[in-house]
Amino acid sequence: MKALSWIVRAIAAIILLQTLFFKFSGAEESIYIFTKVGMEPWGRIGSGVAELIASVLLLIPRTAWLGALMALGIMAGAIFFHLTALGIAVMEDGGYLFGLAVTVSVCSIITLVLHRADIPYLNKRNLS
């Protein structure tokens, strides 16, 4: 289970971290996406900062649950906009970005399940 935890956390963190370059550098795709949903530039920069924080938290075993919860929330927003304003395929990417959002979501859910004992208020031993 420890190996599975590291694998799914690493996958999610790597995907989140690799998209930061595009968000922070103002890549054409990122600007298009956030303009289309009416959140350019602050939504792009804010989501990038949130993804950076989630990535770091995912890589620290003690805070993996919090990083997974953050990543899942961020990806819920991404999936919502793909299913509404953007469409599955964005700028003819064949659904690549949507697939990455789903992958991070699945990895985050697995992380939450594997680290459920670390979540405060769900495990009484963490309350003391």
Image (cartoon, rainbow, N blue to C red):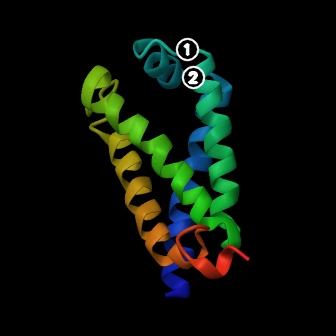
Q: Is any atom of residue 15 visible in this view?
A: no
* Residue occupying the point 65% across, 26% down: 45
In the rendered structure, the answer to whether residue 4 lies left or right of residue 6 reads: left
Identify whether 29 is placed above or below 72: above
- Pinpoint residue 84: horizontal percent, then vertical percent: 26, 25
* Residue occupying the point 31% across, 23% down: 86
- Pinpoint residue 18: horizontal percent, then vertical percent: 59, 47
* Residue occupying the point 69% across, 72% down: 62
Q: Which mark is residue 82?
A: none
Rendering quarter of residue 33 = top left
Q: Which mark is residue 43?
A: 2
Q: Residue furthest right?
A: 128
Q: Quadrant of the C terminus?
A: bottom right
Residue located beneath label 1 in the image: 40
Identify whether 45 is placed above or below 2: above
Question: 33 or 109: which is nearer to us?
Answer: 109
Label 1 Cα neighbours within 10 Å, binned few <14 / some 14-19 / many ≥20: some
Identify whether 10 is placed above or below 96: below
Q: Is any atom of residue 102 visible in this view?
A: yes
* Residue occupying the point 64% across, 82% down: 125
Question: 41 or 91: which is nearer to us?
Answer: 41
